[in-house]
Image (cartoon, rainbow, N blue to C red):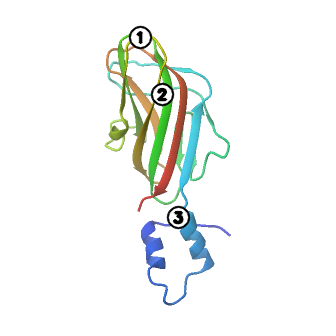
Amino acid sequence: MSQTQRTLAEIYALLADNTTASISPTDLRDAIETLRHTHGELSLSASSLTTINTVDVWEKVAGTTAASPNAFHGMSMPTDCRLLITSAAPRLLHIAVSLSVTPASSNKVFEFVVAKNGDPDDVNSAPSLKRANIPSSVTVAFAFHALIPVVNGDYVEVFARNTTDATNITVETLNFVAIGMPNG
């Protein structure tokens, strides 16, 4: 018995007026699969240096990541620090990122963002922007969230940039969670 994700419009049309009693068990399983949330979670295995090559230019957060047990439904982790959407139906992801970072030197301003398809400047990425003013070379921890619409094949990643100069940053810890709701 396989289930197929459909668009919400297809499910609504199927269930709208069942006067003919023509909804099959397969149709019902498809509706449940479509409405089931997708999810993915990864975390950094060890602290990792993210190299900032140029001031004010986004760099993908570096590091080796591991998937949490039972971490994926409708998502996968094809490479480190990336969640790939494998859900057939469009989704709206609620993403939560928690991380701790240590700059290579004091008095730096770093920004972090969840980027869709490798583009931190995408209009869907901007609302997740987190700015951190780090006055000394200490480890600072914080969290931020994002809502990003995605379709099958899209991916999300965390990016960082230094708006002060080209000083690098070490990501000490990273937990990256995405939960997807039906979206169209």
Tell me where residue 40 sits by quadrant. top right
Seen at 66% across and 46% down, the residue is 70
Q: Earlier in the sequence, mark 2 or mark 1?
A: 2
Task: Return the residue at label 3.
Answer: 34
Task: State the quadrant of the N terminus.
Answer: bottom right
Q: Earlier in the sequence, mark 3 or mark 2?
A: 3
Task: Return the residue at label 2.
Answer: 61
Amino acid type, mark 1: Ser
Q: Is residue 135 above or below residue 62?
A: above
Tell me the element at label 2: loop
Seen at 48% across and 72% down, the residue is 11
Amino acid type, mark 2: Val
Nearer to us in this view, 115 or 38: 38
- Mark 1 Cα-neighbour bin, 10 Å: few <14, some 14–19, many ≥20: some
Badge nearest the viewer, 2 or 1: 1
Q: CA distance from mark 3 to mark 2?
A: 32 Å
Task: State the quadrant of the C terminus.
Answer: bottom left
Q: Is residue 12 above or below residue 47?
A: below
x and y percentages locating residue 92 in the rendered image: 43, 53
Residue 34 seen in the figure: yes
Total count of labels: 3
x and y percentages locating residue 94 in the rendered image: 45, 47
- Mark 2 Cα-neighbour bin, 10 Å: few <14, some 14–19, many ≥20: many
Task: Return the residue at label 1.
Answer: 136
Amino acid type, mark 3: Thr
Q: CA distance from mark 1 to mark 3?
A: 48 Å
Seen at 50% across and 67% down, the residue is 6
Tell me the element at label 1: loop
Nearer to us in this view, 33 or 154: 33
Badge nearest the viewer, 1 or 3: 1
Q: Is residue 157 above or below residue 15?
A: above
